[in-house]
Amino acid sequence: MQIELTLEQSKAVEAVRQFLIDDAADVFVLAGSAGTGKTTMIGRLVEIVADMKLSCALAAPTGRAARILGNKVAQATGMDVGAKTIHSIIYALDRLEVNEDAEAPNDPGLRWFFPLTEDEPDMSVLVVDEASMVGDRESHGDVVRFGSGRLLKDIVSFARARRRAGSDDRLVKLVFVGDLAQLPPVGEEESPALSPQRLKAGFGLTVSTFELGKVMRQREGSTILERATAIREAIAADIFNTFSLEPDGEEIVGIESEVAFDVLERSVQSRSSSVVVVRSNATALEYNRGIRERLWGNAACPVQVDDILLVNRNAHSVDLRNGDLVKVLDVAPSGERASVSVRGGGVVELYFRDATVAYREADGSVVRKRCLILENLLDSPGRELTPLEQRALLVHFRQRNPQLKPRSKEFAKHLRSDQYFNAV
């Protein structure tokens, strides 16, 4: 299936083709704002790689982004390339350390260690979408430790170390795709994976670039497009102290804070798409409680049918990904509460409930999943479970599986598939 391209996109394709045939080129950075055709270009790249009898892998920082990317490329090309998270491609589980008797309140009691994989993948080109999210500042999670802690460094190390299986061919080529105006990773002033200067100076890579400028996915005369373009131009000109979102009465409408919940309630009841963007998790909780009070008459009520939930960690057993927005179709009238005694933290309450949720694929099809959900985050100002709650899940697992030895492979295997420990 041949993808139709604009003149600008055709020029980008030629730049990509030259990159692929140049043995000295290491990285191609494809930049562009939303709607400029970056995903279309990825699809065309996949076709070019196939024509050249090379192999290609698609990756994204989150599970949801990877699934969307894979579906869109399949729709555009008719080729089922699939896409995975960056982490699932470049890392492999090494060991699990368990310490359920940890006394520090900020100790989750277990840690998974994932070094760079030693497997030899059949891959000539690795395409990383949403590359603005790829950081290079060392960061180690409380529960999961990946490689060096520097994701960009590990991607480059992976590409340098891996050749196509059974050949003496060149190292894996990298293609980073993203939006230069997106927020950079936490702790970074820019997105290092989209910065030719950082890639050259930090890793000695030879970098080619192309930036898409024409927005294809927004109607002409759109106020939102005009304002977004003005902001992007200001950023490019290093002008950061001006920001205009003046209402136009149609696409951008000003409302007072005291009527915000009225507007939201009407929007939800009319089944319109409603998203509230706030500056902190604590404010998000305030809005969630206010909206639930309006809709259900109880700010602290459990999950209800028609609720929209955000999945915040991968649940592989039911194929739900971090970042998925799911709609509740059915929910058990009563939940299950587990009171777990945690050393140094007293008793931690865990709230589980069976539910059926659904999400929509890129092609419009609806996917339904039956799962066990963990309701603790509904009334939490945090974006994820606390270390004490994480440790409580571990202790809860140990109480239900006393026959499993913590350092055994069976322990790790059962832990990764346990529906309570991995509740959505």
Image (tube, rainbow, N blue to C red):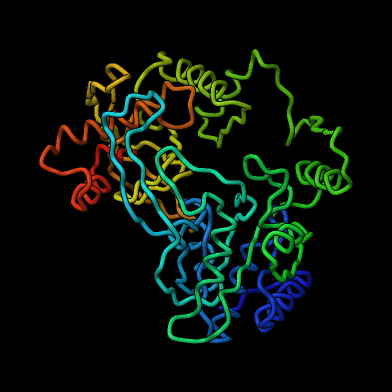
In the rendered image, the vertical position of residue 7 relative to residue 247, given as above or below: below
Quadrant hosting residue 332:
top left
The image position of residue 324, as x and y in percent, is 46, 44
Q: Quadrant of the C terminus?
A: top left
Of residues 372 and 385, the one nearer the viewer is 385
As drawn, is 100 to the left or to the right of 194?
left
The image position of residue 50, as x and y in percent, is 54, 82
As drawn, is 32 to the left or to the right of 368?
right
- Residue at 52% from the left image edge and 74% from the top image edge: 56
The image position of residue 417, as x and y in percent, is 25, 48
In the rendered image, the vertical position of residue 229 relative to residue 297, given as above or below: below
Of residues 160 and 36, the one nearer the viewer is 160
Q: Residue furthest left?
A: 403
Of residues 281 and 188, the one nearer the viewer is 188
The image position of residue 373, as x and y in percent, is 31, 35
- Residue at 70% from the left image edge and 67% from the top image edge: 204
As drawn, is 236 to the left or to the right of 303?
right
As drawn, is 410 to the left or to the right of 145?
left
Quadrant hosting residue 334:
top left
Q: How many marks?
A: 0
- Residue at 46% from the left image edge and 51% from the top image edge: 146
Of residues 422 and 100, the one nearer the viewer is 100
Q: Quadrant of the N terminus?
A: bottom right
